[in-house]
Image (cartoon, rainbow, N blue to C red):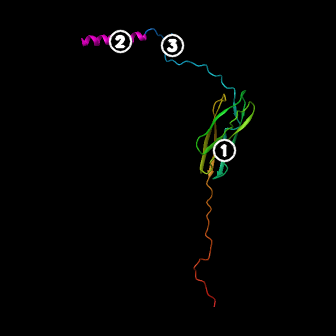
């Protein structure tokens, strides 16, 4: 009796599973896990034109001025919106305009490098915007030279407690 109940239960389960799969096909209008294509937004007509892509500090003294500017113009037909400016490390800090740049107008991206770090400079700043040309990668390079060490010599003072000649 147990075998008959078990067999009937197994048969009923398989039948239910089989019938549940029928009636659906790939083109029946149901979503079968395929990606639905959403209409894409039209591409932006804003465009960024940099005056320069690389700033060369040359040789700069340790602790010297590590600031520079990258000028750019919006050559597109709609406002240029800079969404993010990011330096390649913490020693490179960019400042980008927060307001939209109207077509035909210019602005600047300011970059400050920490010149207390001695050695070669080769860092990048990535600028994300709605420009049709995509992201822009700016480069700063140069060399930070160590400050010369100034040696101080002790002054010649008369030592205290030294014997003094008595005149008599």
Residue marked by disc 2: 14
- Residue ID at (59%, 19%): 38
Residue found at x 59% / y 44%: 90
Where is mark 3, residue-wise? 30
Q: CA distance from mark 1 to mark 3?
A: 59 Å
Range covered by the magenta-colored residues: 1-21
Marks 1/2: CA distance?
A: 74 Å
Kind of element beneath mark 2: helix
- The reply to whether residue 16 is visible in this rendering is yes
Residue where numbered disc 1 is placed = 56
Tell me what residue is drawn at x 38 percent, y 11 percent.
Answer: 16
- Residue projecting furthest to the left: 1
Residue 58 magenta: no
x then y, percent, for residue 101 = 72, 33
Comes first in the chain, label 3 or label 2 = 2
Task: Give the structural element (helix, strand or loop) at label 1.
Answer: strand
1 or 2: mark nearer the eye: 2
Image quadrant containing the C terminus: bottom right
């Amino acid at each position: 009796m147990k075998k008959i109940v078990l067999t009937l239960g197994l048969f009923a389960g398989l039948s239910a599973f089989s019938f549940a799969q029928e009636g659906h096909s790939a083109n029946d209008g149901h979503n079968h896990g395929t990606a639905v294509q959403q209409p894409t937004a039209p591409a932006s007509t804003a465009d960024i034109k940099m005056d320069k892509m690389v700033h060369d500090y040359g040789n700069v003294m340790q602790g010297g001025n590590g600031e520079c500017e990258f000028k750019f113009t919006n050559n597109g037909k709609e406002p240029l919106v800079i969404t993010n400016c990011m330096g390649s490390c913490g020693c490179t800090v960019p400042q980008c305009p927060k307001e939209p740049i109207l077509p035909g107008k210019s602005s600047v991206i300011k970059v400050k490098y920490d010149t207390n770090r001695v050695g070669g400079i080769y860092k990048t700043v990535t600028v994300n915007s709605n420009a049709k040309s995509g992201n822009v990668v700016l480069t700063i390079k140069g060399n930070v030279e160590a400050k010369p060490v100034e040696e101080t010599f002790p002054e010649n003072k008369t030592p205290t407690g030294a014997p003094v000649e008595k005149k008599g």
